[in-house]
Image (cartoon, helix red, strand yellow):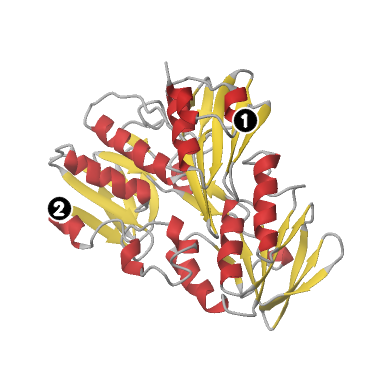
């Protein structure tokens, strides 16, 4: 009987094995995870979980007994270390597992500060795993001083949680503005003002020169402008990279992630990939998305294709971020935009609409679920939106959905 082995027990891996059973696959399934806990949600880690508003058990994507009931063999705390594409085996925790088809859902890994500038000091934390947050949590306390390195969404979400807990927060961003890689200046301006209103010291266009320590523990930072900070701990949010080491060692094609075709197949026979680690064909190039929705949708598509559905993966990009009392919802991809139309609501309600020529590409909506949903529907339908109507706060956005 066919045996499908899935390497990576994150959102994509858990979604894929569940979908295989839902689609009627009756063969053997093995899900391998490097972490010692069942598959869990990552987004709440740096928010509700760090705030103590969510238990570890509530993070789990499925009850622990789900995998046994579905006859899914779950190997936890045992990273895969080698793939033999000819023998069709994978080495996990020193044991060799034979597979008929192999799926890589290895996700992504956080970028770390180099040891040469103090990245290996105690008290320097990444924001990626349950263990990361458990190690960080005792430091997130009233009156503590934290330096956050990186002004992307991870850094800003961590800043919001720390500020809510009474931590004195300094955030440095090497680029000339926060969110520079992922959003327009309008969105950067919105979140800069939001964080400063909550007491966060944001320093843009300022690099971290080095961290300093006492007894192997971080105690300070020297910034690129020559200023110094006393700190109790550091959170590093400088992005993530696709986890491709295992695939590369096996000789699979790597191109901004593990390269797959439209069905999710890798460059070697009977090996597939999905989620944050995989790059797929998109509009004449290749695209890799780092998001929960993409991990779920791509994994479920690949699960179908493992059973010969033959369906190309077509992403419907959307993302979200929670900071203080603001919920940011993003639809589409803003790459290639040449103008942004602002729709201002009451208080902190606003949305920014990205256009490339006359084409609507993306929407950033802050506390405005209607703008988000309408923008998302238009983008997925390949339709645009009248910029004049979008920018008129008195106009009814529903009119944009009319044929």
Q: Secondary structure at mark 1?
A: helix
Residue in front for this viewpoint, 388 or 171: 388
Q: Pointer 1: residues within 10 angstroms few (<14), some, or many (20+)? A: some
Residue 351 on image: x %, y %? 58, 39
Name of the residue lying farthest toward the right: 226
Image side of residue 150 versus residue 52, left or right: right
Residue in the picture at 63% in, 26% down: 336
In this picture, is 215 found above or below 249?
A: below
- Name the mark on residue 391: 1
Residue 271 on image: x %, y %? 34, 36
Residue in front for this viewpoint, 364 or 257: 364
Closer mark to the observer between disc 2 and disc 1? 1
Residue in the picture at 44% in, 23% down: 401
Residue in front for this viewpoint, 147 or 195: 195
Image side of residue 283 versus residue 210, left or right: left
Residue 67 on image: x %, y %? 20, 56
Residue in front for this viewpoint, 326 or 258: 326
Q: Quadrant of the C terminus?
A: top left
Name of the residue lying farthest toward the bottom: 215
Kindly identify which residue carries mark 2.
71
> From where the camera sits, is residue 222 visible?
yes
Image side of residue 359 versus residue 245, left or right: right
Q: Are marks 2 and 1 in contact (CB under 8 Å)?
A: no
Q: Measure the alpha-carbon separation of dots 2 and 1.
A: 53 Å
> From where the camera sits, is residue 278 visible?
no
Q: Secondary structure at mark 2?
A: loop
Residue 117 on image: x %, y %? 73, 65
User: How many discs mark residues in the rendered view?
Assistant: 2
């Amino acid at each position: 009987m066919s045996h499908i082995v899935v390497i990576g027990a994150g959102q994509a891996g858990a979604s894929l094995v569940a979908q295989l059973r839902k689609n009627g696959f009756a063969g053997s399934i093995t899900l391998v995870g490097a972490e010692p806990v069942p598959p869990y949600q990552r987004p709440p880690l740096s928010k509700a979980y760090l705030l103590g508003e969510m238990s570890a058990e509530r993070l789990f994507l499925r009850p622990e007994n789900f995998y046994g009931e579905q006859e899914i063999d779950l190997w936890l705390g045992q990273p895969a270390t080698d793939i033999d594409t000819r023998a069709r085996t994978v080495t996990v925790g020193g044991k060799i597992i034979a597979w008929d088809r192999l799926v890589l859902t290895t996700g992504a890994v956080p970028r770390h500060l180099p040891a040469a500038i103090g990245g290996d000091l105690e008290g320097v934390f990444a924001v990626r795993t349950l263990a990361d947050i458990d190690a960080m949590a005792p430091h997130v306390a009233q009156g503590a001083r934290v330096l956050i390195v990186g002004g992307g969404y991870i850094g800003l979400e961590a800043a919001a949680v720390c500020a809510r807990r009474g931590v004195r927060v300094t955030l440095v961003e090497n680029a000339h503005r926060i969110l520079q890689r992922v959003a327009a200046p309008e969105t950067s301006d919105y979140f800069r003002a939001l964080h400063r209103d909550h007491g966060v010291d944001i320093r843009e266009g300022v690099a971290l020169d080095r961290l300093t320590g006492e007894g192997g523990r971080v105690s300070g930072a020297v910034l690129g402008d020559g200023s110094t900070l006393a700190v109790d701990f550091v959170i590093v949010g400088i992005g993530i990279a696709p986890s491709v080491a295992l695939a590369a060692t096996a000789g699979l094609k790597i191109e901004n992630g593990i390269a797959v075709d439209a069905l999710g197949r890798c460059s070697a026979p009977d090996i597939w990939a999905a989620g944050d680690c995989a790059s797929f064909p998109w509009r004449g190039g290749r695209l890799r998305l780092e998001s929960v929705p993409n991990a779920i949708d791509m994994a479920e598509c690949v699960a179908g294709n493992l059973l010969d559905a033959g369906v190309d993966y077509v992403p419907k990009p959307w993302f979200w971020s929670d900071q203080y009392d603001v919920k940011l919802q993003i639809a589409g991809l803003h790459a290639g935009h040449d103008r942004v139309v602002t729709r201002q609501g009451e208080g902190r309600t606003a949305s920014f609409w990205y256009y490339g020529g006359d084409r609507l590409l993306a929407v950033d909506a802050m506390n405005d679920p209607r703008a988000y949903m309408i923008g998302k529907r238009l983008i997925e339908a390949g339709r645009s939106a009248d910029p004049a109507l979008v920018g008129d706060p008195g106009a009814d956005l529903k009119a944009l959905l009319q044929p």
